[in-house]
Image (cartoon, helix red, strand yellow):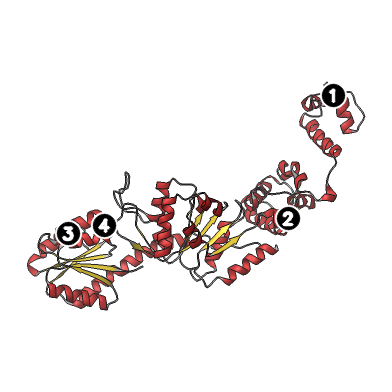
Amino acid sequence: MRFKILIAEDEEITLKHLVYTLKKEGYEVVGVRNGREALDQVEGDHFDVLITDIKMPEMSGIELLEKVKEKHPEIEVLIITGYGSIGSAVEAIKKGAYEYITKPFDLDELIIKVKNIHERKLLRKENVALKAYFGMNRKVSLIARSGSMLKILEVIEGIHNSDCNILLTGETGVGKSLLAKIIHFTSRRQNMPFLSINCATLTEELLASELFGHEKGAFTGAVRTKQGLVEIADTGTLFLDEIAEIATNLQAKLLKVIEEGEFYRVGGTRPIRVDVRFIAATNQQVKKLIAEGKFREDLYYRLNVMEIFISPLRDRREDIEPLSTYFLQKHLPKANKRITGFSKQAMDILLHYRFPGNVRELENIIERAVILEKSSLITPESLPQSLTLYQIETIEPDKIKTIDELNREYAEKVVEMVGGNKSKAAELLGISRTSLWRILKEDLIPDERS
């Protein structure tokens, strides 16, 4: 991010000298002749440092300091004063000035003070970024045995030196957020922040504040200036999950960041420049939303420099077994159990289930099974009954059960549920005891409880 300095000095020769010296050091510098002009500049642009003479026409340096700190407390202020005004300089420090420098001043001393401010600001920003960085789980891996996932890995390998924006598409639960992390941690930005936000979980106002931050007093409750995720993710990656849920006016702000590398905080009047890579994800048909006027076409093409579609788990069954093993190992430690794998029957059930919730549902099923299982292998008894009830939807043709077989299995479960009371079971099933006997294909034994 650029480091920009504003100088307010009424002596023209001194002003030109200061602007020239600091520009030579590589900073962006703007010079004005009085406090009014300085305020106008602050309201219209982003500045990191204000260097102001304490005595100026129309508005003193102290007044300028107070007005700037009131609305933009993040701007550091250096006061220039004569020897006779040291008391005023001390007062300025009490009101928030970073430091003062006396006339006639040593330019090398001024440069050192500006560099100190620059380094302090960088350190503060890096601390925020490091908190995000060390809070991330960088031990991410992609289980890929199916052809479609292997192709995705090839794509990721091919773009690891690129900063292109990426759109991840696919059903809910297929692993889009995991893939976004893998893309980041195999890219040249891997040592910089990876931040993410679900655009569907916040109101428009809260999402705007989370993405772009806000200025103090921008709305009720905004008691201090807050950095947004776009600003914190500078030099890194921002993952926008459920991007299709973002409001159209926020889409315009996001487009400006992507196209121009700058944005405004909520309630702000100064542009802030950033260098962010965007990875977005959606489970919706974005082109349909564009046709309905719900999503900006220009934003879609800016995000969709590279589109990666992740197939649903039912279309890549080769991944089910290795994924199941991975989730078993992941959840075993906290369960404190010794489970070595899956029984053949349990794995067959998993392999023939449709997984409408995709990989996310598979992990939940395995975590539940680990908690319930009492043997050394995951068995069908520790899997949800719904997996076997709906198994007919995905079962292989040569394993399709007859209606009689399904009726018998269901009747047996009902009889078991009521403790073997066949009269009660027949009543629940809405059939006679004779019909139940025919379904079970066993001798009708008088039931004492009937």
Q: Residues within 10 Å of mark 2 (few under 14, many from 20)?
A: some
* Inter-mark Cα distance, 1 to 4: 82 Å
Q: Earlier in the sequence, mark 2 or mark 3?
A: 3
Residue 169 image position (x, y, % from top left): 58, 57
The residue positioned 32% from the left and 46% from the top of the image is: 219
Residue at the location (48% across, 62% down)? 302
- Marks 2 and 1, how far apart in space? 44 Å
One can see residue 139 in this view: no
Residue wearing tag 2: 341
Determine which residue is flagged by label 4.
Answer: 73
Q: Which badge, 4 or 2, comes first in the chain's sequence?
A: 4
Instruction: Between residue 356 and residue 186, name the one nearer to us.
Output: 356
Residue 418 image-quadrant placement: top right
The earlier-in-sequence mark between 3 and 1 is 3
Pointer 1 local density, CA inside 10 Å: few below 14, some 14–19, many at least 20: some
Q: Are the residues at dot 1 and dot 4 in contact (C-beta closer than 8 Å)? A: no
Image location of residue 271, percent across then percent down:
32, 61
Q: Which residue is mark 3?
A: 64
- At 79% from the left and 29% from the top, the residue drawn is 419
Q: Is residue 395 left or right of residue 21?
A: right
Q: Is residue 333 left or right of residue 127?
A: right
Q: Which mark is residue 401?
A: none
- Callout 3 crowding tier (Cα within 10 Å): few <14, some 14–19, many ≥20: many
Label 4 and label 3: CA atoms lie apart by 12 Å
- Counting from the top left corner in percent of width and height, residue 368 is at 66, 46
